[in-house]
Image: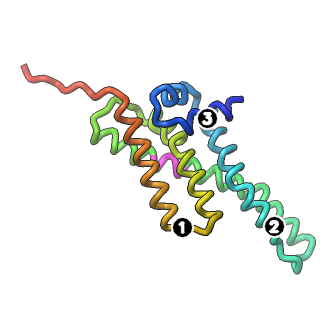
Amino acid sequence: MGFIDSLINSLRLPKREAMFRLNRKGMTNTIVYLFILLAVLFLPDMIRTIRNLDTNLTEVSRGQYLVQVIVFYPMFILFLILIGVSMLAGVALLMRKALGRKLTYQQLWKLTAYAATLPLILTVVLKNIAIPDGVSAILFFLLFSFLMYRMITIYPRVPTKRLS
């Protein structure tokens, strides 16, 4: 039930209530959520890849290919999740600094992970209706940036030091 709850709250972002609920989730839950989300989103690609398997391959080659698709593809996705979310959280850290808000990198990492839900779903939908990758990438970053800006501005400002 945790995945469904996380998905619903991710789709409700940048609402304050959804954001604070998601921020209370542990880092392990966040990573598992991202893995399940991306596995579901990329499942049609995996099925398409297996269905289009070259029939000229030997049984050994076919077996190796299936192992690569079934085992290494999800591991590659997990690697991309960790690297991609970490890089986007770095950008959010710069945004937080520019906006002068009180947030830690860990909070931004989780917010980034959940804020990427809607842009990722949109990107997969656009890919399947043959929209160019460049257009979907621009839409991803615009939507993601908007969500992160709205979420970061909910947090209080860093107090400024007064000179006495």
Viewer-closest of 76 and 41: 41
Q: Quadrant of residue 131?
A: bottom right
Q: Quadrant of residue 49?
A: bottom right
The span from disc 3 to disc 2 (Cα, nearest Å) is 36 Å
Provide the residue designation for mark 1: 133
Secondary-structure class at tag 3: helix
Secondary-structure class at tag 2: helix
Look at the magenta stretch and give its main secondary structure. Answer: helix
In the picture, measured across the screen, residue 97 lies left or right of residue 110, that is left
Provide the residue designation for mark 2: 65
Pointer 3 or 2: first along the chain: 3
Pointer 2 or 1: first along the chain: 2
CB-based contact (under 8 Å), mark 2 and mark 1: no
Residue under the image location 83 percent in, 67 percent down:
51
Pointer 3 or 1: first along the chain: 3
The span from disc 2 to disc 1 (Cα, nearest Å) is 26 Å
Question: Residue 24 in magenta?
Answer: no
Q: Which amino acid does the dot numbered 2 rest on?
A: Tyr
Classify the position of the C terminus by image quarter.
top left
**Residue at the front extreme of this rendering:** 129
Q: Which residues are magenta?
A: 83-88
Residue under the image location 66 percent in, 49 percent down:
38
Q: Which amino acid does the dot numbered 3 rest on?
A: Ile
**Residue at the bottom extreme of this rendering:** 56
- How many numbered badges does the structure rendering display? 3
Please tell me how crowded label 1 is: few (under 14), some (14-19), or many (20+) other residues with Cα within 10 Å: few
Q: Nearer the viewer, mark 3 or mark 1?
A: 3
Q: Which amino acid does the dot numbered 1 rest on?
A: Asp
In the picture, measured across the screen, residue 127 lies left or right of residue 64, that is left
Viewer-closest of 23 and 106: 23
Secondary-structure class at tag 1: helix
Residue under the image location 12 percent in, 23 percent down:
162
